[in-house]
Image (cartoon, coloured by chain):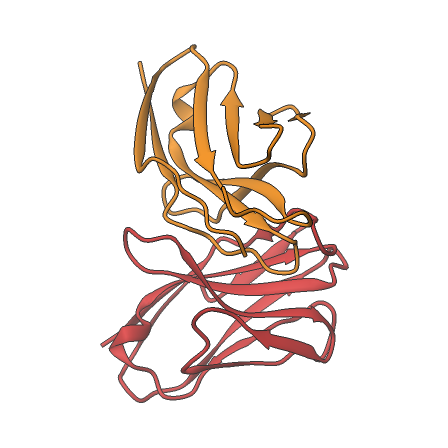
Amino acid sequence: NAGVTQTPKFRILKIGQSMTLQCTQDMNHNYMYWYRQDPGMGLKLIYYSVGAGITDKGEVPNGYNVSRSTTEDFPLRLELAAPSQTSVYFCASSYGVRQPQHFGDGTRLSIL
Amino acid sequence: DAKTTQPPSMDCAEGRAANLPCNHSTISGNEYVYWYRQIHSQGPQYIIHGLKNNETNEMASLIITEDRKSSTLILPHATLRDTAVYYCIVSPGDKVIFGPGTSLSVIP
C-alpha cells in the first residue's frame, strides 16, 4: 500500500518556466489537497478537491491550477514560475469529511 | 473556520507526559478538533480528532473542555522521537487550515 505518492521529490526551475507536480493515491480517497510550506512556517492550503471533476480554492491559489479527472490523481500546475513559489509542496488525501488526512513526502521546489 | 491559539514552543522531559494546550474559543457546533504533527521536514502525520468527548488512541489522548473552547493533547510517555511541531486545527472537516503550531522538544 503506497499511500500518497508525490513526484518529483526535488526540482529546480527557472523564472517563467512551467511544471506539473504529480500526486497520486491508491486508497480510493474522495478528498485530495495541495499545501505549500515556506521555511519555518505552517502549511497553507492551495487547492482541494472533494471528488473527480470538483475542485475549489484554498487560502493561496494564485499562480496555481489543478485538475481532478480521476479519483487517484490530483496534479498541481505552475504556469509561470516565480521566486515566491519556492517552497515545499505537500499533497494529502482523505476518505471523506472529518476523516484523517494522509500526506505524501513532499516536493521541494526552488525557483531561481 | 475557527481560529486556534497554541504556545509557540514547549519542552518535555523524556518519559514524562507531554500536555499540549490549544485554545479555540470561537469553535462552532459542527467543528471538530484535529491534531497533527510534523517531524522535521516530513509530511504531517494525523494523531487524533474529536468533537466533544475525550478521545484516546495508540498515540495520544485528546481532552476537550465541556464548553469546547479549549483542548489538550496528551502524549503519555514522551520519547525523543516525539520531538516535532504539533498542530491543533478546528474545522468542520471539508478543508483543514494549519496554523503555526507548537514546537515540542523532548529532552533526554
Chain B palette colour: orange
Residue located at (74% from left, 54% from top)? A95
Compared with A6, A16 (above or below) is below
Q: Position of residue A60 (x, y in %)?
A: 43, 72
> Which chain is depicted red?
A
Q: Quadrant of the C terminus of chain B?
A: top left
Q: Position of residue A53 (x, y in %)?
A: 72, 80
Q: Residue at the far left: name it.
A: A112
Write down the quadrant of residue B1 in the picture: bottom right
Compared with A71, B102 (above or below) is above
Residue located at (68% from left, 39% from top)? B51
Q: How many marks on residues?
A: 0
Q: Nearer the viewer, residue A82 or B12?
A: B12
Q: Nearer the viewer, residue B3 or B80?
A: B3
Write down the quadrant of residue B103 in the picture: top left
Q: Position of residue A100 (x, y in %)?
A: 65, 46
Compared with A78, B60 (above or below) is above
Write down the quadrant of residue A110 in the picture: bottom left
Q: Residue at the far top: name it.
A: B15
